[in-house]
């Protein structure tokens, strides 16, 4: 079939992919060889070879943290060709042509105030250059810090995270305006500003993550990410992070630990043990980092498990599972400015209970591979780095009803698998006040699954049925991106453009799709622009406008009459769907006092989503299962209007105490009738009080207030959700220099509550209809050892 999104001939697609793949594999070799050519050419032409030239060596660091700053741009003002870029360890060398008169050395780095140093002789220049971070980060980005690998410190950081949950999705719930869909004890599915599923772009180090194999999203992409390998999580709100791929409601980028290059061989790591009552959470993690100036090797592994838990009202909830994982990553630097990277990881999940779904997860195995090459040139004007990456992931998933009462009537087993692979090449540069970056990428996602049912009783006893879940679907996306930031005094102007060519087809059609053309192709254009103004050193305001476009995902296109919502309605895929588009405005205001004691921030947003994809009742379609009340077909229903905000106020007394108050809210409605959009969380506020006593003990109190959600989509199976108060307390201390202890109580008052996005408990587990409750009171203890 064709639609108006500029279809391409398949031959053009093949040519495009061929050129992209050749470029990806050949470019690193050419760049590596070009390094010696550049140096040879410079020597031949006598560049920087005058006898008056003198070498200047220094290290660029952050003035506040002391961390080295790679990719800092260093140049001598008004001297053509005299510039360089700092290496990954912050060091650089620049041959300065001394002219006997005063010159100006300029150092700049994104996110830091530029620095100018006047000099006549090299002796006037420092061996360590300190850049001051810009007090105001004006892009619509939230950062959730996890923890870093490093040697033990004598002091304690009162801002570090307390007890870390097993699940990455659960950890994301700590961020403002981020919720999660709970279907069991494993795989909480994140929701950012009311956007979930394929409306969120989940990335790891900027690259595509694995895809969910389960139609009911037992295993969302975040469930395949080892949280202990993550240093921080960047949540890019709205359609502005186009660099990372098609962006609609937001991009969540999990940033893995990166080694800090050491000139001497070093070994460091950490071990973590944690236990929690009620849920029975048991966590063991270990990481090891060894390396020197030439290479770094990072090894990690762990085991975790949970038991069934009890809600605040005493209801026993089946939610147990076991998981284990391990991985390795190697960084090799064959020459100055060059780095090769390779890594793999494997994870295994067994016997995960999902009381909100028709079946439980018997197994979910994930295998990931990635490789990359980076070049940070020192002698190419305007160019900071070139890199190429490739990645592959495979998910093998099985679910069944063997622990359900329905097993007495029928034996149901579903097998599904996904394969995701892709390549990406990127260039980043800076010329004077202009920072630019561009990339090209290709992603291939294949997903297939089959459900097998053997009837044991009833009128179909002795019969069997084989059910095609995904129809052996394949989705391919080729993208081109370019972006730039221009710094002009107190102003910053940002622009970005992305072009995506998306194709999809089903290669093994189910009977109800037989005889139809399920192929589709879309040509999507996304844009973003922003302008920021520093009103003072500590205050700034910015306005971002963006247009993001996403093509329908595999479920929306090809799901074969399966109940994947909140109720028993079956959902039918629709290959004729048009892409969704969103047009969004983000206003960001941030300010802080000179002593950094008081910080205020307000993020406001509004968006109009067009061709919004949702399940719509189609009376002409009959369900596959007789007991199903009907069929919801994915359709481009109508436009959706959204608006909301995130606001925070934080007060700190250095090394004594801090208080952080935050609030967030999202409103969404269909513009045709004003009805509510599904899966929108209610208003939420949070107060976190933290102190430091005797230089050793850090108590923390976390008080959370969630209001009643009266706006819900009854057609999606939603209903009113009562508000609640929640309180957690904890205390952290360093027992020894390299041994820390963390203990506390979650849900201190044993509140009986459910999050609005939680799925309903299956009636065969609990009579009546009620949302899956959150765990009641639980005590935890966590021990960490760093070396």
Image (spheres, helix red, strand yellow):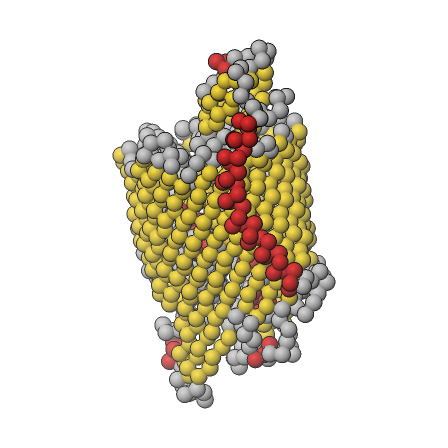
In this view, the residue farthest toward the front is: 44
Query: Between 274 and 287, which is closer to the camera in this rendering?
Result: 287
Query: Between 442 and 552, which is closer to the camera in this rendering?
Result: 442
Using residue 739 as the reference point, say whether residue 583 is left or right of it.
Answer: right
* Residue at x 52%, y 79% (from the top left corner): 625
* Residue at x 52%, y 18% (from the top left corner): 53
Image coordinates for residue 776, horizontal then vertical, percent: 38, 55
* Residue at x 52%, y 41% (from the top left corner): 31
Q: Quadrant of the N terminus?
A: bottom right
In this view, the residue farthest toward the top is: 100
Image coordinates for residue 385, horizontal then vertical, percent: 53, 38
In the displayed structure, 163 sits above or below 609; it is above
Residue 161 visible in rendering: no
Using residue 356 as the reference point, say whether residue 120 is left or right of it.
Answer: right
Image coordinates for residue 729, horizontal then vertical, percent: 38, 43
Which image quadrant is residue 354 in? Answer: bottom left
In the displayed structure, 637 sits above or below 781; it is below
Q: Quadrant of the C terminus?
A: top left
Residue 282 visible in rendering: yes
């Amino acid at each position: 079939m064709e639609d108006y999104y500029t279809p391409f001939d398949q031959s053009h697609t093949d040519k495009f992919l061929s050129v992209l793949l050749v470029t990806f594999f050949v470019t690193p070799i050419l760049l590596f060889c070009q390094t010696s050519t550049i140096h040879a050419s410079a020597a031949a032409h006598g560049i920087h070879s005058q006898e008056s030239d003198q070498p200047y060596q220094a290290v660029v660091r952050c003035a506040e943290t002391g961390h080295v700053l790679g990719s800092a741009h260093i140049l001598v003002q008004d001297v053509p060709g005299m510039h360089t870029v700092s290496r990954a360890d912050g060091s650089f060398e620049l041959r300065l042509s001394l002219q006997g008169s005063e010159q100006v050395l300029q150092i700049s780095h994104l996110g830091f105030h530029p620095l100018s140093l006047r000099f006549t002789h090299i002796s006037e220049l420092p061996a360590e250059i300190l850049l001051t971070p810009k007090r105001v980060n004006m892009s619509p980005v939230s950062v959730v810090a996890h923890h870093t690998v490093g040697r033990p410190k004598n002091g304690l950081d009162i801002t570090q995270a307390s007890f870390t949950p097993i699940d990455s999705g659960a950890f994301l719930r700590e961020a403002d305006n981020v919720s999660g869909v709970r279907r069991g004890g494993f795989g909480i599915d994140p929701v950012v500003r009311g956007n979930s599923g394929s409306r969120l772009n989940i990335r790891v180090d900027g690259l595509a993550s694995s895809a969910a194999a389960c139609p009911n999203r037992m295993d969302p992409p975040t469930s395949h990410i080892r949280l202990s390998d993550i240093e921080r999580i960047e949540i890019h709100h709205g359609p502005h992070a186009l660099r990372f791929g098609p962006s609609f409601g937001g991009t969540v980028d999990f940033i893995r630990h990166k080694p800090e290059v050491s000139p001497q061989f070093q070994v460091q790591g950490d071990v973590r043990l944690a236990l929690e009552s009620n849920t029975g959470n048991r966590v063991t993690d270990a990481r090891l980092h060894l390396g020197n100036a030439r290479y770094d090797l990072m090894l990690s592994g762990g085991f975790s498990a949970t038991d069934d838990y009890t809600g605040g009202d005493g209801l026993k909830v089946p939610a147990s599972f076991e998981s284990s994982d391990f991985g390795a990553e190697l960084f090799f630097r064959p020459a100055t400015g060059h780095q090769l990277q390779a890594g793999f990881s494997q994870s295994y999940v067994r016997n995960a209970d999902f009381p909100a779904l028709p079946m439980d997860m018997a197994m979910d195995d994930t295998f990931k591979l990635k490789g990359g090459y980076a070049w940070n040139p020192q002698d190419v004007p305007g160019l900071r780095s070139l890199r190429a990456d490739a990645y592959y992931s495979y998910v093998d998933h099985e679910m069944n009803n063997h622990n359900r009462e329905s097993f007495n009537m029928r034996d149901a087993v579903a097998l599904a698998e996904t394969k995701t692979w892709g390549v990406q090449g990127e260039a980043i540069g800076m010329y004077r006040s202009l920072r630019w970056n561009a990339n090209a990428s290709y992603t291939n996602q294949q997903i297939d699954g089959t459900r097998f049912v053997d009837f044991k009783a009833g009128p179909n006893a002795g019969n069997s049925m084989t059910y095609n879940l995904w129809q052996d679907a394949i989705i391919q996306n080729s993208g081109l991106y370019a972006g730039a930031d221009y710094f002009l005094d107190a102003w910053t102007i940002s622009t970005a453009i992305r072009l995506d060519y998306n194709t999809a087809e089903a290669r093994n059609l189910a009977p109800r799709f037989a005889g139809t053309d399920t192929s589709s192709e879309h040509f999507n254009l996304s844009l973003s622009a922003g302008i920021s103004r520093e009103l003072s050193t500590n205050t700034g305001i910015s306005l971002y406008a963006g247009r993001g476009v996403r093509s329908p995902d595999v479920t929306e296109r090809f799901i074969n009459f399966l109940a994947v919502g909140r109720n028993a309605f079956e959902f039918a895929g629709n290959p004729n769907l048009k892409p969704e588009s969103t047009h969004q405005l983000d206003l960001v205001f941030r300010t802080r006092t000179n002593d950094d004691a008081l910080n205020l921030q307000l993020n406001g947003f509004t968006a109009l989503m067009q061709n919004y994809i949702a399940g719509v009742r189609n009376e002409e379609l009959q369900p596959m299962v007789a007991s199903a009340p009907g069929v919801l077909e994915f359709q481009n229903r109508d436009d959706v209007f959204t608006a909301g905000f995130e606001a925070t106020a934080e007060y700190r007394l250095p090394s004594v105490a801090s208080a952080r108050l935050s609030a967030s809210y999202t409103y969404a409605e269909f513009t045709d009738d004003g009805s509510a959009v599904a899966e929108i969380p209610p208003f939420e506020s949070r107060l976190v009080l933290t102190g430091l006593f005797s230089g050793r003990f850090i108590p923390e109190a976390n008080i959370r207030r969630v209001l009643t959600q009266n706006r819900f989509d009854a057609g999606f199976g939603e209903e009113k959700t009562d508000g609640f108060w929640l309180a957690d307390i904890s205390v952290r201390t360093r027992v020894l220099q390299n041994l820390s202890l963390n203990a506390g109580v979650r849900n201190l008052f044993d509140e009986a509550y459910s999050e609005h996005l939680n799925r309903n408990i299956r009636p065969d587990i609990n009579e009546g209809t009620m949302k899956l409750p959150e765990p009641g009171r639980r005590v935890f203890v966590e021990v960490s050892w760093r070396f």
